[in-house]
Image (cartoon, rainbow, N blue to C red):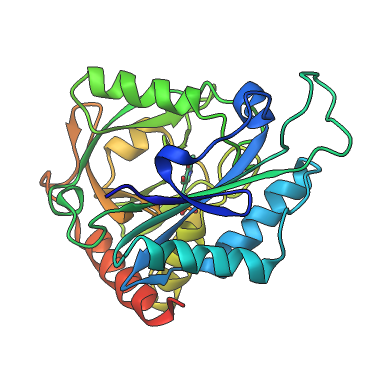
Amino acid sequence: MSRIVYVNGEYLPEEEAKISVFDRGFLMADGVYEVTSVLEGRLVDFAGHMARLKRSLAELDMAMPVTDAELEAIHRRMVADNGIEEGLVYMQITRGAADRDFAYPEGATPSLVLFTQKKALIDSAAAKAGLRVATLPDLRWKRRDIKTVQLLAPSMAKMAAKAQGKDDAWMVDEDGFVTEGSSNNAYIVTKAGTIVTRHLSNDILHGITRKAVLSFAREAQMKVEERPFTVAEAQDAAEAFITSASSFVTPVVEIDGTALGDGAPGPVARRLREIYVAESRKAAV
Ligand code: PLP
């Protein structure tokens, strides 16, 4: 059975959905997106995703095409119509269709597209085994805090990591500090037990999962430092992990061929994953 997708006011089988070839999302990556996870048919941290969406739109002078209540209702209907118990809702807003020009068009109608993906988020093989990552130069632009659909640089990094037989890429800035994963925030846990992750700035995406996980860690009396860390510091760490809406908290067990600790998922990552899943189940709407 084909999925039902949402395109500009219509709920359609995916084969029937259409977007203009002049859409600036297609021509210029002039669009932003959000991915919200679904647990037990309910949306995880929806308010957080909507807050970041509005920030991304504001940074690009783009309008919200529907009201907050409408957008929430569309998310809910997508979950219901596609029978999503566990998985993801992808939502994209572009500036819409207009004659191709580098200047933002006046009066273009933004495009709004949503689709769903069924995915086992809790029972994940990656969470059990841990990820092996390769570090690669961060080739992205300088506004990584805006969640735009221009994802070719992280996609190239992921392919380069896969070519090395690894699971994912950690991207590294010109000064040798890790920025984040190809589609997730990156953390290490020092041998003294401190969780370290890069501080918020234009260099990284302000992860919604990051915010929740850091707050759970602090509530559990874990020590957190938000600062840059090098690849060498990461390779010397007791453990490492990533966070994102689609991976929750997932351990990293190897960086550029160096195993961390005993090479198995570490206790801090495992505990934070348990807390995150339990709290998200409770708070999902
Ligand atoms: N960093 C990047 C580059 C991402 O693409 C993502 C998610 O797509 C994240 C971090 C994690 O963000 P969130 O926790 O909001 O999913």
Residue at position x 18%, y 23% in the image: 165
Residue at position x 24%, y 33% in the image: 167
Figure check: 8 above or below 214: above
Q: Where's residue 52, x and y in %?
A: 63, 56
Pick the front one: 267 or 242: 242
Q: Where's residue 102, x and y in %?
A: 80, 20
Q: Residue furthest right?
A: 106
Q: Is residue 236 left or right of residue 49?
A: left
Pick the front one: 51 or 22: 22
Q: Is residue 2 left or right of residue 12?
A: left
Pick the front one: 180 or 223: 180
> What is the quadrant of residue 232 in the picture?
top left
Q: Where's residue 60, x and y in %?
A: 76, 40
Total marks in image: 0
Report whether residue 129 is seen.
yes
Residue at position x 56%, y 45% in the image: 205
Report whether residue 183 is seen.
no
Residue at position x 26%, y 70% in the image: 274
Pick the front one: 80 or 194: 80
> What is the quadrant of residue 95 in the picture?
top right
Q: Is residue 74 left or right of residue 260?
A: right
Q: Is residue 269 left or right of residue 26?
A: left
Q: Where's residue 250, x and y in %?
A: 27, 52
